[in-house]
Image (spheres, helix red, strand yellow):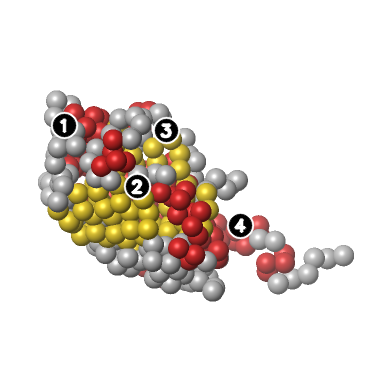
C-alpha cells in the first residue's frame, strides 16, 4: 500500500505526516502496530479496541512539560473506553484533555450519559475524572494538551463535575482550537522551547474560552491576539482581509482591537503584512517562477508594487534580488547542470 486511505496507514503516509508537521530531528515519535501497539496505546487513558487488530497503526509524539503534557498522534480508526476501574486506578490528579482532531469523518465522545459529535478541527474537551468513550471512525490526527483539572476549575476534579461545554465553531472557538493544535505540535513534534509562562498562558486561553474563569483573572488580551493570529492565518491570502475585517470577525471594534495590540511588537495591520511577506518568501524559496504580480495575488497583496515595498522593508532587497540569490544557492545538480571538472 503506497498511501493513506480513510481507514489505513502505511509507512509512507506516516512519514509524509511527520514531514508536513516539520518534525524535529532526531525523530522522537513512537510507532505502535498490531496487537502490541494496541496494548501500548491503551496504557494512556483507556482500553483501545479496533475491528482489525493486525491493521492498527499509530505514530505518537509525546512530551511532558512543567505543567501540561503535549501529545500529537496519527492513528487508524479506534474505539477508546475509559472505565470506572481506570478512573479509580489513576495515578496523579485528574486531567482535562483539550484536543483538536483532524479526520475525514466524525468523532463521537460519550461522557456523563451524553454523546457529542465533533467535526474536524473542532476543539473537544473531556475530563479523566469520569469514564468516557471515544469513537474515531477514520484515520485521525489528534493534537492535545493534558492539563491538571484544578488548573481549569477546582470543580472538574470530581467524577460528578458534569460534561464540559461544547466549543462552537465560532471564530473564537476555531482560534482556540488552532492555538491548541499549534502549541501541541510545537512542543511535542518540533521540540521547541516552552516556558512555564507559555503553558500558563495556554491554560488561561482555554479556561477563558470554555467559561471556567472562576477566581482567576484571565488576561483577555492574550485571547484576542491568539484569535487575531488564527484569523490572519486563515485569511491573509484574501486581499480584502484587513484590520477592519479582522475586528469584524472577532466581534469587536477596530479601536478595541488595536488597544489589545498596544504592547505587542506588531499592530493588526502589520501582523497581516508580515504573514503575507512570509508567504512570498516561502514561494520564492520553493523556486516559484511566477511573475511578481501573480505572486502578489497568491499572497494577498493588491499589487506587485506593494509587495515589492513590504518585501524590501523586511529583507532589505527586492523579491527579484532574493529570487536570484536563491537560484545561485541551489546545488548545480538541482539545476540540471553537471559540475565542471
**Nearer the observer, disc 2 or disc 1?**
2
Q: Which residue corresponds to mark 3?
A: 65
Q: Secondary structure at mark 4?
A: helix
Residue 155's label in the rendered image is 1
Q: Is label 4 or label 1 in front? A: 1
Is residue 287 toward the left or the right of residue 267 in the image? right
Q: CA distance from mark 4 to mark 1?
A: 59 Å
Left or right, 310 with reference to 221: right
Q: Are marks 4 and 3 in contact (CB under 8 Å)?
A: no
From mark 4 to mark 2, how far is it between C-alphas? 54 Å
Residue 319: x percent and y percent?
Answer: 50, 59
Distance in Å between CA atoms under marks 3 and 1: 24 Å
Image height of 102 relative to 265, above or below: below
Between discs 4 and 2, the one toward the N terminus: 2
- Viewer-nearest of discs 3 and 1: 1
Mark 4 or mark 1, earlier in chain: 1
Judged from the image, the secondary structure of the residue bearing numbered disc 3 is: loop
Q: Which mark is residue 46?
A: 2
Calculate the distance from the C-alpha at mark 2 to the C-alpha at mark 1: 23 Å
Q: In 3D space, how far apart are the residues under numbered discs 3 and 2 (Cα atoms)?
A: 22 Å
Q: In percent of the image, x 40 and y 29: which residue is there?
A: 66
CB-based contact (under 8 Å), mark 3 and mark 1? no
| In the depicted structure, whether residue 89 falls above or below residue 8 | above
Residue 309 showing in the rendered view: no
Amino acid at each position: 500500500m503506497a498511501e493513506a486511505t480513510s481507514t489505513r496507514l502505511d509507512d509512507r503516509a506516516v512519514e509524509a505526516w511527520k514531514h508536513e508537521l516539520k518534525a524535529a530531528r532526531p525523530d522522537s515519535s513512537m510507532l505502535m502496530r498490531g496487537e502490541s501497539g494496541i496494548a501500548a496505546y491503551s496504557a494512556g487513558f483507556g482500553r483501545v479496541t479496533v475491528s482489525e487488530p493486525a491493521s492498527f497503526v499509530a505514530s505518537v509524539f509525546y512530551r511532558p512539560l512543567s505543567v501540561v503534557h503535549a501529545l500529537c498522534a496519527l492513528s487508524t480508526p479506534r474505539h477508546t473506553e475509559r472505565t470506572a476501574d481506570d478512573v479509580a486506578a489513576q495515578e496523579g490528579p485528574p486531567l482535562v484533555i483539550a484536543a483538536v482532531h483532524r479526520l475525514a469523518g466524525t468523532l463521537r465522545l460519550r461522557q456523563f450519559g451524553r454523546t457529542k459529535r465533533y467535526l474536524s478541527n473542532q476543539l473537544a474537551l473531556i475530563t479523566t475524572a469520569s469514564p468516557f468513550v471515544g469513537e474515531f471512525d477514520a484515520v485521525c490526527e489528534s493534537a492535545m494538551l493534558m492539563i491538571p483539572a484544578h488548573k481549569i476549575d477546582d470543580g472538574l476534579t470530581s467524577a460528578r463535575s458534569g460534561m464540559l461545554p461544547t466549543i462552537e465553531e465560532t471564530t473564537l472557538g476555531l482560534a482556540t482550537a488552532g492555538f491548541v493544535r499549534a502549541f501541541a505540535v510545537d512542543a511535542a513534534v518540533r521540540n521547541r522551547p516552552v516556558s512555564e509562562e507559555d503553558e500558563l498562558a495556554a491554560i488561561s486561553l482555554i479556561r477563558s474560552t470554555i467559561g471556567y474563569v472562576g477566581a482567576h483573572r484571565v488576561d483577555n488580551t492574550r485571547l484576542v491576539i491568539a484569535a487575531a493570529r488564527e484569523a490572519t492565518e486563515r485569511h491573509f491570502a484574501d486581499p480584502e482581509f484587513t484590520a477592519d475585517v479582522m475586528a469584524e470577525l472577532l466581534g469587536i471594534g477596530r479601536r478595541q482591537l488595536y488597544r489589545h495590540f498596544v504592547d505587542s511588537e506588531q499592530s493588526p495591520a502589520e501582523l497581516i503584512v508580515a504573514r503575507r511577506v512570509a508567504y512570498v518568501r516561502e514561494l520564492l524559496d520553493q523556486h516559484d517562477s511566477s511573475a511578481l504580480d501573480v505572486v502578489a495575488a497568491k499572497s494577498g497583496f493588491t499589487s506587485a508594487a506593494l509587495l515589492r515595498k513590504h518585501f524590501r522593508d523586511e529583507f532589505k532587497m527586492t523579491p527579484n534580488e532574493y529570487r536570484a540569490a536563491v537560484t545561485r544557492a541551489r546545488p548545480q545538480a538541482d539545476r540540471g547542470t553537471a559540475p565542471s571538472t
